[in-house]
Image (cartoon, grey):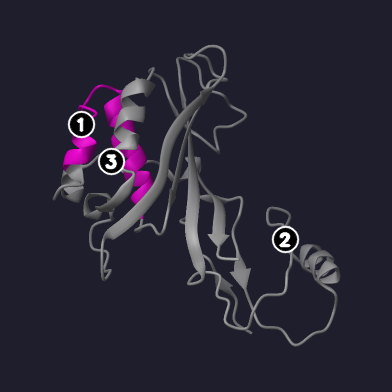
């Protein structure tokens, strides 16, 4: 029996909406399979649903789009309760400049500048459908203030989201201009983009399929 995941996640990355496909011979109701699987899995992994799919369905290759979320906290005091699920930094960030830069990613572009060095792939061109930042919390500099980046695309290169976030943070810190994001999409190299953000703030949120 081979289980096919919709995508791998690096060590330290989280998955809210991972999808897996497998062919089984048993005839148990899907509700029974949910209970049986969760009884055997470790407590930090839960099966939310089991559904029957067409014979040609593949969790990875049938996906139409993926959505990732990255969480940041920027302020003088960190939040100890979410430190495993967000990149925390002591200084404030210019979220307006980060939003402007994130918007430049929407569309079909060559994302070679945001791919891990040494990775082999047939093409570095991807289409991004949505790239947005939001804030929650009354005090922009307080420990409860959360900056969330969400991005939806037809596919992602290795470490692509984390490299984008690292670049956005450099823009938020004032180390580079918001317009540099568009420049990186026009023949930029990995060395010219920002550092790779830590894995702990990244979540695979959702996969969408036709039908």
Q: Position of residue 142 (x, y in %)?
A: 52, 14
Crowding around mark 1 (Cα neighbors within 10 Å: few <14, some 14 to 19, many 20+) is some
Q: Marks 1 and 2: in contact by CB < 8 Å? A: no
Crowding around mark 2 (Cα neighbors within 10 Å: few <14, some 14 to 19, many 20+) is some
Please tell me in which quadrant of the rendered image residue 127 appears.
bottom left
Which marked residue is nearer to the observer: mark 3 or mark 1? Answer: 1
Report helix, strand or loop for mark 2. loop
Please tell me in which quadrant of the rendered image residue 167 appears.
top left
Instruction: Residue at 60%, 63% (x, y): give it.
Output: 19
Is any atom of residue 8 visible in this view? no
Give the labeled residue for mark 3. 195
Query: Quick check: 146 above or below 75?
Result: below
Give the Cα distance between marks 2 and 1: 42 Å
Give the labeled residue for mark 2. 47
Q: Position of residue 156 (x, y in %)?
A: 38, 57
The front one of 165 and 81 is 165
Of the two numbered discs 2 and 1 on the same chain, state the one appearing first in sequence. Answer: 2
23 vs 14, left or right, is right
Query: Quick check: 2 above or below 46?
Result: below
Report helix, strand or loop for mark 3. loop
Q: Position of residue 119 (x, y in %)?
A: 27, 64
183 vs 164, left or right, is left
Q: Is 81 inside the magenta-drawn segment? A: no
The front one of 206 and 116 is 206
Question: Residue 179 got which mark?
Answer: 1
Magenta part of the protein: which range? 159-183
Give the Cα distance between marks 3 and 1: 17 Å
Report helix, strand or loop for mark 1. loop
């Amino acid at each position: 029996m081979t289980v096919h995941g919709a995508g791998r996640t690096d060590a330290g990355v989280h998955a809210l909406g991972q999808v897996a496909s497998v062919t089984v011979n048993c005839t148990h109701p899907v509700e029974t399979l949910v209970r049986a699987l969760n009884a055997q899995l470790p407590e930090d992994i839960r099966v939310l649903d089991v559904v029957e799919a067409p014979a040609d369905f593949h969790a990875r290759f049938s996906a139409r789009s993926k959505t990732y979320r990255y969480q940041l906290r920027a302020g003088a005091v960190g939040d100890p309760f979410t430190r495993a699920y967000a990149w925390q930094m002591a200084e404030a960030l210019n979220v307006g400049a980060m939003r402007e830069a994130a918007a430049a990613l929407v569309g079909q572009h060559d994302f070679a500048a945001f791919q891990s060095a040494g990775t082999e792939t047939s093409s570095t061109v991807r289409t991004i459908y949505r790239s947005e930042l939001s804030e929650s919390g009354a005090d922009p500099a307080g420990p409860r203030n959360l900056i969330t980046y969400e991005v939806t695309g037809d596919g992602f290169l290795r470490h692509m989201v984390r490299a984008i976030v690292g670049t956005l943070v450099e823009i938020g810190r004032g180390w580079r201009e918001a317009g540099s994001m568009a420049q990186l999409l026009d023949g930029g190299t990995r060395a010219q983009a920002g550092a790779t953000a830590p894995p702990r703030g990244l979540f695979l949120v959702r996969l969408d399929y036709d039908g």
